[in-house]
Amino acid sequence: MTDHTLTRADIAEKIYLKLGLSRNESANLVEQVLEEMSSSLKRGEAVKISAFGSFVLRQKNERIGRNPKTGVEVPITPRRVMVFKASHVLKNLMNGRDTAPEHADD
């Protein structure tokens, strides 16, 4: 395991090295992809990236919470939360397994 965090700049640099786009073009491409994903989520649309995973918005209703230090009950306002669900391919990759889909006939 490593303590490194992948950043926008890292992704842009990888695109620059692999595709040969200029650094500015690579950075713009990353920004455009992230902007499109953000806009889709803001509109309530799910974002599904094949062999990677899905980003989905879920609605949380108002509920009563409790301050863990004082025990005082507090209302928690309704809100939307984003959930990421990794694909089976990504899960297998993270666990060092073959990423080929399994067949039910095997």
Image: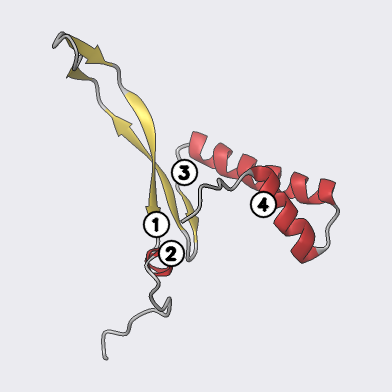
Q: Residues within 10 Å of mark 1 (few under 14, many from 20)?
A: some
Task: Locate residue 97, reporting x and y percent.
Answer: 38, 75
Residue at disc 1, secondary structure: strand
Which color scheme is applied?
Answer: secondary structure
The amino acid beneath tag 3 is: Glu
Q: Is residue 49 left or right of residue 56?
A: right
Q: Earlier in the sequence, mark 1 or mark 4?
A: 4
Q: Give the answer, above or below, for where 28 lies relative to 50.
A: above
Task: Locate residue 65, reporting x and y percent.
Answer: 19, 18
The amino acid beneath tag 4 is: Ile
Q: Are marks 2 and 1 in contact (CB under 8 Å)?
A: yes
Residue at disc 3, secondary structure: loop
Q: Earlier in the sequence, mark 3 or mark 1?
A: 3
Q: CA distance from mark 3 to mark 2?
A: 22 Å
Q: Nearer the viewer, mark 3 or mark 2?
A: 2
Q: Are marks 3 and 2 in contact (CB under 8 Å)?
A: no
Task: Locate residue 63, reporting x and y percent.
Answer: 20, 20
Residue that mark 3 sits on: 45
Residue that mark 2 sits on: 90
Q: CA distance from mark 3 to mark 4?
A: 24 Å
Q: Give the answer, above or below, for where 80 lies relative to 30.
A: above
Q: CA distance from mark 3 to mark 1?
A: 17 Å
Q: CA distance from mark 2 to mark 4?
A: 18 Å
The disc placed on residue 10 is none
Q: Earlier in the sequence, mark 3 or mark 4?
A: 4
Q: CA distance from mark 2 to mark 1?
A: 6 Å
Residue that mark 4 sits on: 11
Residue that mark 1 sits on: 86
Q: Earlier in the sequence, mark 2 or mark 4?
A: 4
Q: Earlier in the sequence, mark 3 or mark 2?
A: 3
Q: Nearer the viewer, residue 102 or 42?
A: 102
